[in-house]
Amino acid sequence: MESKNIEFNEDELQAPAWLNAQFIGGILSEYEQLPDLKVTDLQVSPATAQGDHYASIMFRTKVEYTTPKGKFSKPLIIKTMPEQEGHKKDMLAESHLFATEIGMYCHALPEFERILREAGDNTKLYVPCIYHSLMPRQVMVFEDLVAQGYTVIRDSPPSLGDLKLAFDKLAKWHAVSMKVINEQPDFLKELKHGMWGMTTFLNDPIVTTGIPCFLKMLDKVPELTKYKPYFEKIRNNYMQQMSKVMEEYRTDPKPNRYYVLCHGDFHARNMMFKNNQETGDFEDVMLVDFQISNTCPITIDLIYSIFMLMDSEERWDLGKEYINYYFSVLSETLRKIGFKGEMPTQTGIWEHIHSHKDYEFFMMTSMLPMMAAMKTNAFKMIDVLTDPETKQKTYFQDEYLTDVKKLLPKFEELGYFENL
């Protein structure tokens, strides 16, 4: 469940001046087609905790309003771009993020749900976006899922059941996207920009300092020092190798490979779970934050989930139980929706994952230390992202070192260090 002592992002402590009763009233009036709607009270607060997201700022509003039909209230989520000067604004300036997410909510996901409905599957893939704009500012407005009984899991890792809910939904999403790519190859052509499409991201210390920090750690941990030569060999070209993978579908599609519309940021803070009021068990999960969704190899979401969603115990065998469960739902859904392409195999999925070892290296050396820092709350995320000394310290966290001491031998067993 959500923590009662949430620390908010500093740039969400004060709402921008334009986020006012006039702005919200105009949105609601158009959405509900009631020109006489009048906002009588508007309360604005931060919508998310530190570490929940970085590529936007979000506010929760409670709106009270009147119409000729009476008095009403509606909780909303407002998502927009950072306006405060600093690292976040600089990295996200001139990005495609909001255009991508608008395309997901208004184009891709409605079609995906339609295909599922035709096959008798009522799975809900997204919460409706009631307003969006790119000019004069980038804004999206949603009904608040918290008011519908959904919550973010923060104080403990997702349970086995929670994770299966998440992989169930991802598998259905991926399956429908495979059908769309096979039958309507141009339908998703605009959804081509992941984080690797952002020059500011590729040049940011988040990316560029991962391997150097990792090498310094290997120097200081005797039992891991033997792995240093392998990472010295790849440090100058593994980013280029990953870029090839990210753009593979568009530039050089490979045979016997699986391409889907990936979520791109598949971790627990981008999921909201709804529990059964009688049993207390979670019965649904809603995926959110589609800003870097794009068409790419199926491995991107799966490898990302191993490092950013699963707990250490699950990660040590590369999430075998969950990936295999995901595959079972993927196969079942493909059959249900009438997929006419070549059916994926479980062996093929794992071969595909292992062929993208450079992405696994990136996740381990650059993203996993940040995830460990988020879990322990030992560092402020802004310091991890912008202060070199703080970032280096994250590589010596006990949780991270325990992970690495298990992962590197596993990679060696799989032959990842051969022919580097």
Image: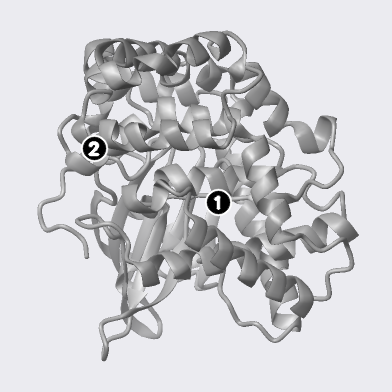
On residue 132, the disc is: 1
Neighbor class of circle 1 (other Cα within 10 Å; few <14, some 14-19, many 20+) is many
Element marked by disc 2:
helix
Whether residue 160 appears in this view of the structure is: yes
Q: Residue at x 46, y 16 (%)?
A: 204
Q: In this view, does 250 lie to the left or right of 133?
A: right
Whether residue 65 appears in this view of the structure is: no
Residue type for callout 1: His
Placement of 281 over or under 245, stated as above or below = below
Picture quarter containing residue 83? top left
Placement of 256 over or under 77, stated as above or below = above
- Foreground: disc 2 or disc 1: 2
Q: Where residue 103 sits in the image (x, y, percent)?
A: 66, 50
On residue 399, the disc is: 2
- CA separation in Å, label 2 and label 1: 40 Å
Q: Quarter holding the N terminus?
A: bottom left
Give the mark nearest the N terminus, 2 or 1.
1
Q: Where residue 296 sits in the image (x, y, percent)?
A: 71, 42
Q: Residue at x 18, y 40 (%)?
A: 376
Is there a contact, CB below 8 Å, between mark 2 and mark 1?
no
Q: Is residue 389 left or right of residue 287?
A: left
Neighbor class of circle 2 (other Cα within 10 Å; few <14, some 14-19, many 20+) is some
Q: Which residue is drawn at 70% across and 81% down?
A: 117
Q: Residue at x 65, y 58 (%)?
A: 106
Picture quarter containing residue 400? top left
The residue closer to the viewer here, 358 or 246, is: 358
The residue closer to the viewer here, 119 or 209, is: 209
Q: Where residue 240 sits in the image (x, y, percent)?
A: 66, 17
